[in-house]
Image: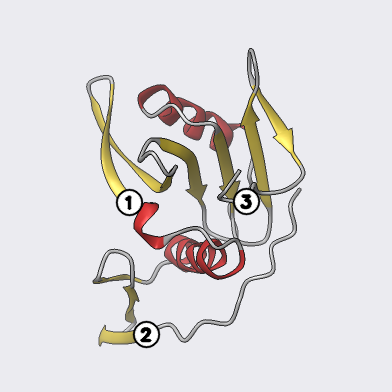
Amino acid sequence: MIKIYYPHYPFKIKEEEIGKEFIFDELRKQWVRLTPEEWVRQNFIQYLLQIKKYPASYIAVERKMKLGEVNKRFDILVFDSAAKPWMLLECKGPNINLDKVVLWQVLHYNIAIPVKYIVITNGQHCYAYKKGLLDFEAIPFLPSYDE
């Protein structure tokens, strides 16, 4: 497991209806519903930007993809400097266990969008995997962007 120390960030949060909060996603430039999963996603994005120094212009958030005949959405996709998919991240709410089901979900996404790295997180726990010769292998840290 990788220990993540989230940086402080002044998120913009508003309440549009009673009990319905929204957070401004700086990368998507739009307000999105603040769910537990979105909270994890927004904090992890700030970790990638501020701590790991990944360039914002190479990060895509919640975009559609085609997996066979089914439309899906990935959480976060980081591109390399050649604009090729490099890292695929799956975010879950803090109460969701990061089990084989979650790992299989992102591995299936990897069929449609092949990447070198896969990351799963629920905000409290984080696991990363690097593509080996035959399979993905667990790694103890997130790679630097310039790797």
Label 1 CA crowd tier, 10 Å (few <14, some 14–19, many 20+) = some
Give above or below for 55 relative to 34. above
Tally the marks.
3
Q: Is tag 2's residue or tag 1's residue first in the polypeptide sequence?
A: 2
Label 3 CA crowd tier, 10 Å (few <14, some 14–19, many 20+) = few
- Between 31 and 93, the one lying in front of the other is 31
The reply, left or right, for residue 82 in relation to residue 32 is right
What colouring does the structure picture have? secondary structure
Task: Name the residue located 66 percent from the left edge and 49 percent from the top edge.
Answer: 142
Q: Pinpoint residue 11: horizontal percent, then vertical percent.
A: 43, 82
Q: Pinpoint residue 15: horizontal percent, then vertical percent.
A: 30, 86
The answer to whether mark 2 and mark 1 are in CB contact below 8 A is no
CA separation in Å, label 2 and label 3:
28 Å
Q: Nearer the viewer, mark 1 or mark 3?
A: 3
Label 2 CA crowd tier, 10 Å (few <14, some 14–19, many 20+) = few
CA separation in Å, label 1 and label 3:
22 Å
Q: Pinpoint residue 132: horizontal percent, then vertical percent.
A: 65, 21
Q: Nearer the viewer, mark 2 or mark 3?
A: 3
Q: Is tag 2's residue or tag 3's residue first in the polypeptide sequence?
A: 2
Q: In the rendered structure, which amino acid carries the disc numbered 2?
A: Lys
Which circle marks residue 62 in the picture?
1
Which circle marks residue 12 in the picture?
2
Q: Secondary structure at mark 1?
A: strand
